[in-house]
Image (tube, helix red, strand yellow):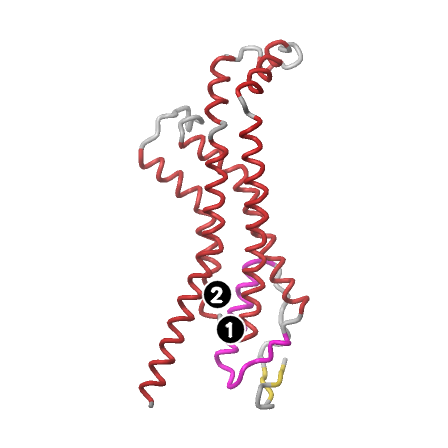
Amino acid sequence: MSGKSGGGSPVVMMGGDLQKPLNLLSAISEIQTIGAMEQDASSEINSKFLSTLFRWDFFSIGLRNSLLSGFVSLFLTPLSLGVFYKLIPVFNDTHISLFDKIYILFFNFSMSIGFGLFLSKIKESYVGSLSKGMTKSLLGGFALGEFIKITIIFILFNWIYLQMSAKNIYHTLLFFKTHTDTVPFVKNMNYVKAYHWLMSFRNVFPVSAVLVLVSSILVIGIPIVSIAYFAYKQKKRISNLIFFLT
C-alpha cells in the first residue's frame, strides 16, 4: 500500500493492505507493525489510510474486551470481598491471614493490571499519525467500555445494597420458612445465622463498586501514562540531540 507524503513523494508500506484485527492481540500486533513502518519511513504516512471502518474495528475490540472484563468483575469482586471479610469460607475455613488478604486484593485487581500492562506494550509504536490513530481508537473503545461497566455495576451494586435491607431480608427468610414444602433446600436452614450473614454480606456491594471503579482507572490509566511518559522521553531525547548538533 502506498500513500503521498507532505512533499509529494510516495511512501510504500511493505506487507500489503491494513489487516482487520480479529482480537486484542492482533490489534496490538497491527499497531506495532504500522509503528515500525512509520519509524523506518523517510516521510510521514498519510493518515487517510485509516478509514472510519478500520477505526471502528479497533474501537469495537477495545469496547468488547472492556465489557468482557466487566462481566468477570460483576461476579468476582463481591465473592473476593466475601472471602476478605471472612463471610465466604475457602476450603471450609474462614480464618485468613494478612498475606491471604493482600493476595485477595491483588487477585481482584490482577485482570485490570494485566490488561493495562498488555495495552502499554504499544507505547513504543505511538510514533506516526497512522499508529496514533489506531491506538486512540483502541483505547477509546476501552474507555467507553469502562465507563459503561462502571455505570452499570455501580448502579446495580448500590441497588442490591438498598434492596437487602433488614426488613426485606426478614420477609424473604420468613417466606422460605413458611414454604419449606415448595422450597425443600431451606428445610434445615438456620434462619438466624442466615439473617446475620446476609446483613453482613450486603456491605460488600458498595465496597465492590468502589473497587470496580479503581480497576477501571487502572485499565485506562496504565497505558495512557506509559504512552505519555514514552512520548515525553522521545521528545526530550530529540531536543537534546538538536541542542547537541547546534
**Which residue shows up at 36% across the image and 85% down it?**
242
Magenta-drawn stretch contains 39 = yes
Q: Is residue 177 magenta?
A: no
Callout 2 crowding tier (Cα within 10 Å): few <14, some 14–19, many ≥20: many
Mark closer to the chain start, 2 or 1: 1
User: Which quadrant: the N terminus?
Assistant: bottom right
Using the image, determine if residue 192 lies above or below residue 75.
Answer: above
Q: What residue type is labelled 1?
A: Gly
User: Badge 2 is on which residue?
Assistant: 122
Q: Residues within 10 Å of mark 1 (few under 14, many from 20)?
A: many
How many numbered circles does the render carry? 2
Res 91 → quadrant: top left
Label 1 near label 2: C-beta < 8 Å?
yes
Q: Which amino acid is tagged 2? A: Ile
> Which x, y percent locates residue 102?
35, 39
Q: Position of residue 171 (x, y in %)?
A: 59, 15
Which residue in the protein does label 1 denote? 35
> Between residues 77 and 240, which one lies in front from this camera angle?
240
Location of the C terminus by quadrant is: bottom left
- Residue shown at 31%/86% (left/top)? 244
The spot of residue 235 in percent (x, y) is 40, 76
Q: What span is colored magenta in the figure?
A: 23-49
